[in-house]
Image (cartoon, grey):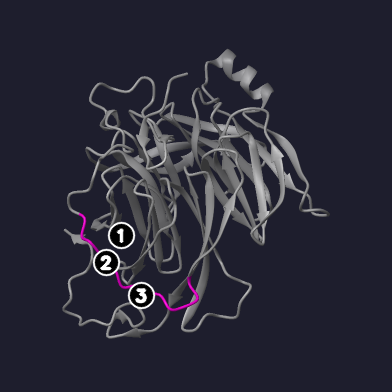
Amino acid sequence: MYSDASIKSSLEEESSSNRHSNVSLPMSPYRTSPWTSHTNPFIIPPDQTDLFPSGTGLIASLIREEGHIYSLATFNGLLYTGSDSKNIRVWKNMKEFTGFKSSSGLVKAIVISPKGQIFTGHQDGKIRTWKISLQNPQIHARLGTLPRLKDYIKSTLSRRKIRHSDAVSCLALDDINGFLYSGSWDRSLKLWRVSDSRCLDSVNAHDDAVNSVIIGFDGFVFSGSADGTVKVWRVEPSGKSQTGRRVVEVAVLVRQESAVTALGVSMGAGVLYCGSSDGRVSFWGRNLVRLGILNGHKFSVLCLALAGDLVFTGSADKAICVWGREENGTRHVWLSVLTGHEGPVKCLAVEEDVNVEEAVGGRRWVVYSGSLDKSIKVWKVTDFVGWEGGRRSGFLSCSSNDDPIFDAF
């Protein structure tokens, strides 16, 4: 095992969770750690006026001394957190509710199906599956490990690589088709069938660590890597079997010097977002044409989350930028910066606030942010509705001639 890249925070030296694989090419863009002083020279400092109404902002901090927070997921009012420890903690109403423990490997990714099946990706290269008890949500039963032992033994005879040889860095669940995708520092992308836990395909997806994989619009799957590329994939039938499937590369969306560190998709708007180690967030439309770049961070963008027409970007600069997307997706407006973390913001999760009546003028969201400062912070943010002249009326009190806070091509 080899060491991660590292940065110096204001408190201590923090460990990096996105780093190059141990067999990186000599010119890999991830040779320069995104945690170091890799500043964005094109950042446009936003107006410091907070555009959100009263009642929004930081509402709580959750702290349990178990190391850096690497992953978050929400399900039916529960918050799941993965950290340096082998424990997955479960929180309810901003209090610790329960937890469960894996046998090994820190928890780098968590996804949950609508039926309550939980998938966790670990440092040891394994994917573990769990089920929430219908009788008692405090009980989480272990279902198994991907790949299953019998499948792994068979694969060694046929020389198929169905087990990740390095950390599982990201997971994406296609609940409609019953597929799970896993990306790893071993550079591979694997396709699993949820119903029988079988690995249907494994591809050498990138030339360096896979940092993000996400289900996209129009049947696409997107993957982002430390090699500076975003790739587009589709699943197609494979072989004579009616159930056989393979992952096919459709296109390379971008090749850049900076590592790709995070991806996010708005299904309704048909917009793909890509965060990079240079602090930028690029975005593409449904036709896979790049529409622009959001410049709001000084250092690497480490995570993305979307809710309604809001885009949240977390960064190694310890801040979370909030952006509003206008209807056609071509224009974004900077709304606010959420500050309070003392370390890089590593992961984000968002759920609609169901504990209050509809917020004045729009929907209210609960935003969870996990950081390398070992804390989880809870925020409330309102997404305004209403349009005037093609612009969101609640966002900015400025003329239509004002320049947008992003670089357009």
**SS of the residue under disc 2:** loop
Q: Is residue 86 left or right of residue 51?
A: right
Mark 1–mark 3 distance (CA, rounded to whole Å): 26 Å
**Residue at coordinates 62% horizontally, 42% vertically from top-left?**
119
**Label 1 neighbour load within 10 Å: few <14, some 14-19, many 20+:** some
Question: Pointers 1 and 2 in contact (CB under 8 A)?
Answer: yes
Please provide percent x and percent y for residue 131: 72, 45
Q: Is residue 243 visible?
A: no
> Which residue is more in the foreground, 335 or 182?
335
**Residue at coordinates 23% horizontally, 65% vertically from top-left?**
405
Q: Earlier in the sequence, mark 1 or mark 2?
A: 1
The label nearer to you, 1 versus 3, is: 3
Residue 360 among magenta residues: no
Please provide percent x and percent y for residue 364: 51, 73
* Three-letter amino acid code at the position of disc 1: Gly
The label nearer to you, 1 versus 2, is: 2
> Which residue is more in the foreground, 316 or 341?
341
Magenta part of the chain = 43-56
* Three-letter amino acid code at the position of disc 2: Thr
Residue placed furthest toward the front: 11
Residue indicated by mark 1 = 285
Question: Pointers 3 and 2 in contact (CB under 8 A)?
Answer: no
Residue indicated by mark 2 = 330
Residue indicated by mark 3 = 51
Picture layout, residue 139 above or below residue 101: below
Please provide percent x and percent y for residue 50: 35, 72
Mark 1–mark 2 distance (CA, rounded to whole Å): 8 Å
Please provide percent x and percent y for residue 230: 32, 42
- Kindly indicate the quadrant of the structure image that contains residue 404: bottom left
**Label 3 neighbour load within 10 Å: few <14, some 14-19, many 20+:** some
